[in-house]
Image (cartoon, rainbow, N blue to C red):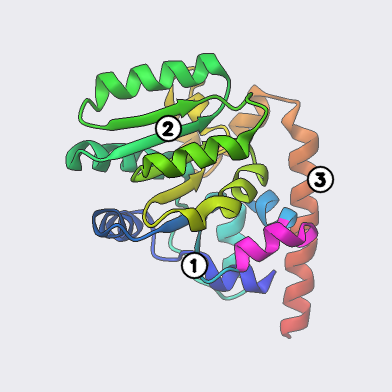
Amino acid sequence: MIEYFDKIYKNGLHQFQDDIYNRLVCGKKTFIITANPETLMIGKSNREFNTILCDKETIITPDGIGVVKGANQLGYQIKERVTGVDIAKYLFSVLNKEGKSLYLFGAKPEILNTLVKKIKLEYPNIKISGATDGYVSDKDAVFEQIALKKPDVVMVALGIPAQELLISRHIQKFNKGIFMGVGGAFDVLSGMKKRAPEFFVKHNLEWLYRICSEPKRLKRFYKSNIRYLGEIRKVRRNMR
């Protein structure tokens, strides 16, 4: 667990935006993973995903408040959450400003199509290299085609850790690009699912809003977070 906290981005959203902008305009290949407690617990049990998280070239951002608080308990000062939705929105604005290209991969066809239409309307200077829904059978073949198109940003919405494992298998085929697994963010970015109201976002309670809106999430959330709290306590004991 401690190896993850060593790597997690600590300087806040605005600094991250500056960093990612510089990487984008310079064409520096970058792999972003947005982490909540479940992400880190998957890393503990999935060797391949753990290797990706620990890779020195991977950037991990603190998407969940549990990651921020857990890190702080272990002496790591993380300024604030840096969420996948916020990163994606910023990338849309930068791509539009710079006239750069984007590939979207994942989600249901109706969600993806709605998102593409919204991007074309609100960010007309973005060059959409392609968009493929997440229900294709051969996802590796899709990435082979993405590599030929050489987009500046690739967002993959296939759920964790499938999206990160897929990116990892193919990222060496690219000479540039920002690569990011976004989970269910296409639902929010398309407008087909509302993000938590401002009160919940401001007070780091988006997790509570999601559970209230989708009670089926409760079991998964409970299981991963209880295990995560246990890991934090274990690390704290070992640090004494």
Q: Callout 3, which amino acid?
A: Lys
Disc 2: CA contacts within 10 A as few (<14), some (14-19) or many (>=20): few
Q: Main secondary structure of the magenta part?
A: helix
Q: From which residue to which does the magenta span run?
A: 43-54
Q: Is residue 191 above or below residue 95?
A: above
- Mark found first going from the N terminus, 1 or 2: 1
Residue 57's tag is 1
Of the numbered discs 1 and 3, the one sitting upstream in the chain is 1
| Residue 108, picture quadrant | top right
**Visible residue check, residue 224:** yes
SS for callout 3: helix
Residue 196: x and y in percent read 50, 29
Q: In the rendered structure, does residue 56 fall within the stretch colored magenta?
A: no
- Which residue has dot 3 on it? 223
First of labels 3, 2 by sequence position: 2
* Local secondary structure at mark 2: helix
* Residue 79 image position (x, y, % from top left): 43, 62
- Discs 1, 3 touching: Cβ within 8 Å: no
Q: Residue 98, how many percent across, how many down?
A: 19, 43
- Which part of the image, by quadrant, shows the C terminus? bottom right
Tell me if label 1 and label 2 are in contact, CB under 8 Å: no
Residue at 77%, 38% in the rendered image: 220
Q: Amino acid at mark 1?
A: Glu
User: Disc number at residue 198?
Assistant: 2
Residue at the image point whose x is 28% and y is 21% from the top: 120
